[in-house]
Amino acid sequence: MGFGHRVYRGGDPRAKHLKEMSERLTKEKDEEKWYTLSCQVEEAVWDLKHLRPNVDFYSASVYHALGIDVDLFTLVFSVSRVSGWLAHIFEQYRDNRLIRPRAIYVGPESREYQPIEKRI
């Protein structure tokens, strides 16, 4: 979502660096409107929800300023996390323990499968 973080309650320290990078890159590309808009959204979310941006929020304006196509944003996001995901897999194999989530699913049960063509 781009805001809030389970660990960095006071704000994600990585977001500060991406914000600075976004400002610099959008100025270089004469696309400051994206940085300005991002700052306005950040301020609005703080006013309404008291949430600070996480590492993902300013990534969009940085990717855009770097000329990365919007369709590739999710791919770049995923590739940047593969090493962490693999580390978790290796930890799980090494410790031979399942990692239990800290949350309990409270959604509807026994839902019928809907083919993708029939989904809204």
Image: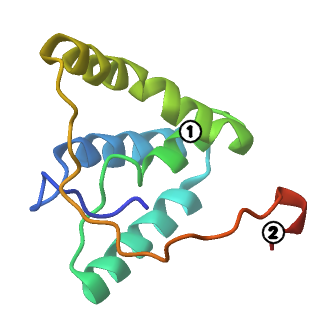
Residue highlighted by disc 2? 119
Find residue 69 and report its horizontal and vertical position in percent: 72, 38
Q: What residue lies at 24% left-to-right and 66% top-to-bottom? A: 52
**Observer-nearest residue: 40 or 57?**
57
Give me the C-alpha separation between circle 1 and circle 2.
31 Å
**Observer-nearest residue: 53 or 112?**
112
Q: What residue lies at 36% left-to-right and 82% top-to-bottom? A: 44
Under circle 1, the secondary element is helix
Q: Is residue 103 above or below residue 83?
A: below
Find residue 83 and report its horizontal and vertical position in percent: 36, 18
Q: Amino acid at mark 1?
A: Tyr
Labels 1, 2: front one: 2
Furthest residue toward front: 110
Under circle 2, the secondary element is loop
Q: Quadrant of the C terminus?
A: bottom right
Q: What residue lies at 34% left-to-right and 49% top-to-bottom? A: 19
Q: Quadrant of the N terminus?
A: bottom left
Q: What residue lies at 62% left-to-right and 43% top-to-bottom? A: 64
Q: Is residue 98 left or right of residue 73?
A: left
How crowded pointer 2 is (Cα within 10 Å; few <14, some 14-19, many 20+) is rated as few
Furthest residue toward left: 10
Choose the circle earlier in sequence order: 1 or 2. 1
Q: Is residue 35 above or below residue 90?
A: below
Find residue 77 and report its horizontal and vertical position in percent: 50, 35
Residue highlighted by disc 1? 63
